[in-house]
Image (cartoon, rainbow, N blue to C red):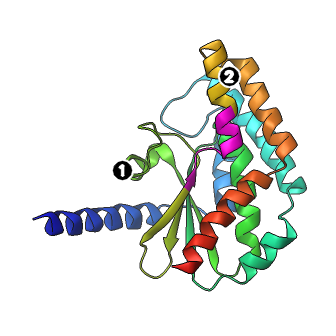
Amino acid sequence: MGFVTLQHQKAVMKYIIEKSLSQSYSYADYRNQIKNLLKEGKSTGNEQSEALTHYSELNETRMNRLEKTIVVADEYVQKLQQLKREYIWLVISEGWCGDSAQIVPVIYKMAQVSPKVELKLVFRDENDDLMKLFLTNGTRSIPKLIVLDKNTLEVLGEFGARPIGAKQLILDYKAQHGVVDDKGKTALHMWYLHDKGLSIQKEIMELMARLELE
């Protein structure tokens, strides 16, 4: 009975992933979708508010800057170019999410380097079934990178929603202040600025190294 249940779970997961991939975006299309909505004064996602639109506008500036400044470390470039297996990196994101704005351009730069990695992005609120499969401590935290075998669509691993250092910063801030206010968010973005995407690269490459050994 357990075997049947496990097989059923795998079949359901594969169906959800296939459905999400069918409505996924390339990185360029993802950026354009956000830009086009901003022209209408809207953000991505089901909820609309002035605050979310404001965050989306800030994130546009961040992503534009990161696309110009983020450099993939030489040691990771070499490893990404020498991957043996073929992968899809499926990222769950939203335009208003500050962590997404800091992390997704780094993932994009890494995927660009490797002939064995295809990057696809989906919006969280349009893919609730997928998001429910990849919760972080029971929450719908984004961004979430799901590493898939390109040929079988088997889930091989995941990264997110934050690198360890950023996660710890927020835990410490919450412990001290009880809430993550604007000052806490500013501290988080300063952490990302000083880190220059290196922690994200390191953690993703540690995951990929493990997958290459399997």
Indicate which disc residue 173 carries: 2
- Residue 50 percent across, percent down from the top left: 64, 22
- Residue 46 percent across, percent down from the top left: 47, 35
Q: Amino acid at mark 2?
A: Tyr
Q: Would residue 145 be visible to someone looking at this image?
A: no
Residue sitting nearer the eye, 25 or 92: 92
- Quadrant, the N terminus: bottom left
How far separated are the C-alphas under marks 2 and 1? 31 Å
Q: Amino acid at mark 1?
A: Asp
Q: Looking at this view, name the residue that lies furthest to the top.
A: 177
* 128 within the magenta span: no
Callout 2: helix, strand or loop? helix
Task: Give the foreground label among 2 and 1.
Answer: 2
Residue at 66% from the left image edge and 29% from the top image edge: 170
Callout 1: helix, strand or loop? helix
Residue under label 1, please give it: 129
Residue range in magenta is 159-168
Residue at 78% from the left image edge and 34% from the top image edge: 189
The earlier-in-sequence mark between 2 and 1 is 1
Indicate which disc residue 118 carries: none
